[in-house]
């Protein structure tokens, strides 16, 4: 009669014998363990060296792959995969005691990663186009390529690369929103390759001209992208950074006349309201609209407000290096005129009124920095804008 100890010992020896005969292992691709153990995605036009790390049973092992290889490794290329079908890579492992086990690896074409722009707008601080997108959820994405249309239709040139861990925005430093609109697209760069172009977005371009009876005409190119705009909003202000909403129009409209504008220098901008918002990677930053370039009427005021006489005004020397004088000859008294100086952002930095003569002296210390300034001379009947270069 077998003792309890003998029974337990036999069971243990039998268990050890079964385990010794069990063959296990895992696949490697180019030396790296395949995540998921049974599935591997191929990059286009690539070949991989697959090997199998066998364990259990009784070494040494022999191998037979579905590719015909009889070593512990084999090579399989993307070109060997059957289009639109999962391919299975098989290896049959046999130990020295003729114990045998088969292992399968499902090989598939790597899925294409789709990436699109969310919005393009004008960065008003830099006066440059800004491209915005949302982070791709695919963890294999490493970076993003930004493209801009060249002078040839549908031909795009790479203008920037943004790492995945950066904020999902890109400033086109080569752009000039005041001159022309621009069209952009992008791709996501993954472990395999860059994706194809999916969508295209084009900025708005706003222009201004003189209307009838002291009105201003705005003309623009509509925004172009994936989703149609909900509406356009029109902004106006006496300074570039002090714009206020004056009206909204349908997204099918491309012109607008400001029938009741206030007198003086005016700045305008157009805002496109889409049906979505863009969140470029952080919860604290949200883009809910796209802005056009800003335009102003400063270069048109002299034409619009001219008196029935030819005034004479002069700034000398121009450019101003140390000092310069503004001289003017008008029929009214000097005290009836005001001279205002604006920087290129539309901010009034100096105002001279209650003048006692027709010459005003400007010193270099009156200006915070070098650059171009606008000098406006106005009276109840007349207004003129001149440019002053400060070096």
Image (cartoon, grey):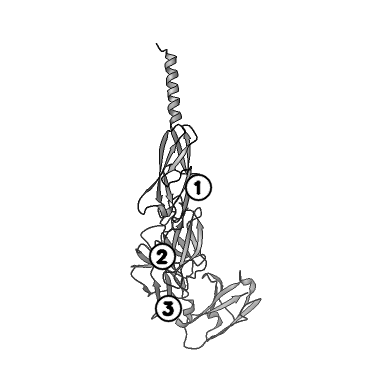
Residue 277: % across, % down: 40, 57
Q: Which residue is mark 1?
A: 30
Residue 49: % across, % down: 48, 48
Crowding at mark 2 (Cα within 10 Å: few <14, some 14-19, many 20+) = many
Residue at 41% in and 72% down: 153
Q: Nearer the viewer, residue 164 or 245?
A: 164
Q: Nearer the viewer, residue 317 or 194?
A: 194
Secondary element type, mark 2: strand
Residue at 47% in and 85% down: 307
Above-or-below relation of 18 to 366: above
Q: Which residue is mark 2?
A: 201
Q: Nearer the viewer, residue 2 or 303?
A: 2
Q: CA distance from mark 2 to mark 1?
A: 40 Å
**Image quadrant where residue 318 sits:** bottom right
Above-or-below relation of 14 to 371: above
Q: Which residue is mark 3?
A: 209
Q: CA distance from mark 3 to mark 2?
A: 27 Å
Q: Assign the N terminus to one quadrant of the image.
A: top left
Labels 3 and 2: the sequence-earlier one: 2
Residue at 40% in and 50% down: 108
Residue 162: % across, % down: 50, 58
Q: Which mark is residue 276?
A: none
Horizontally, residue 86 falls left or right of residue 361, namely left
Report if residue 352 is visible in the image: no
Whether tag 3 and tag 1 are in contact, CB under 8 A, the answer is no
Whether tag 2 and tag 1 are in contact, CB under 8 A, the answer is no
Q: What is the count of numbered marks? A: 3
Q: Nearer the viewer, residue 339 or 85?
A: 85
Q: CA distance from mark 3 to mark 1?
A: 65 Å
Residue at 37% in and 58% down: 276
């Amino acid at each position: 009669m077998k003792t309890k100890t003998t029974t337990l010992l036999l069971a243990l020896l039998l268990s050890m014998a079964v385990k010794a005969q069990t063959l296990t292992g895992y696949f490697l691709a180019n030396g790296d363990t395949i995540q998921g153990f049974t599935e591997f995605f191929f990059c286009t036009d690539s070949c991989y060296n697959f090997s199998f790390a066998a364990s259990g049973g009784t070494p040494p092992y022999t191998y037979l792959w579905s590719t015909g290889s009889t070593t512990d490794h084999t090579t399989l290329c993307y070109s060997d995969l059957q289009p639109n079908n999962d391919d299975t890579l098989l290896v049959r492992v046999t130990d020295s005691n003729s114990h045998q086990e088969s292992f399968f690896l499902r090989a598939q074409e790597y899925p294409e990663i789709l990436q699109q722009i969310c919005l393009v707008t004008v960065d008003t601080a830099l006066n440059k186009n800004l491209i915005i997108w949302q982070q791709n959820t695919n963890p294999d994405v490493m970076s993003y390529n930004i493209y801009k249309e060249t002078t040839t239709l549908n031909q795009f040139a790479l203008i920037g690369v943004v790492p995945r861990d950066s904020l999902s925005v890109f400033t086109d430093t080569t752009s000039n929103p005041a001159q022309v609109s621009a069209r952009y697209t992008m791709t996501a760069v993954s472990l395999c390759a860059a994706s194809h172009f999916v969508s295209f977005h084009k900025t708005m371009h706003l222009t201004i001209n003189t209307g009838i009876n002291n009105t201003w005409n705005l003309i623009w190119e509509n925004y172009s992208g994936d989703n149609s705009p909900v509406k356009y909003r029109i902004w106006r202000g006496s300074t570039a950074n002090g714009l206020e909403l004056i009206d909204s129009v349908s997204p099918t409209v491309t012109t607008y006349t400001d029938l009741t504008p206030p007198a003086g220098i005016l700045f305008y901008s157009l805002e496109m309201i889409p049906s979505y918002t863009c969140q470029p990677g952080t919860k604290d930053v949200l883009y809910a609209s796209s802005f056009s370039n800003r335009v102003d009427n400063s270069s048109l005021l002299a034409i619009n407000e001219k008196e029935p006489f030819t005034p004479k005004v002069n700034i000398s020397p121009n450019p101003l290096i140390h000092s310069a004088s503004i001289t003017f000859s008008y029929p009214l008294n000097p005290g009836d005129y005001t001279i205002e100086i604006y920087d290129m952002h539309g901010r009034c930095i100096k105002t001279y009124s209650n003048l006692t003569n027709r010459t005003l002296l400007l010193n270099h210390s009156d200006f915070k920095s070098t650059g171009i300034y606008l000098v406006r001379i106005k009276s109840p009947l007349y207004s003129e804008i001149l440019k002053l270069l400060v070096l």
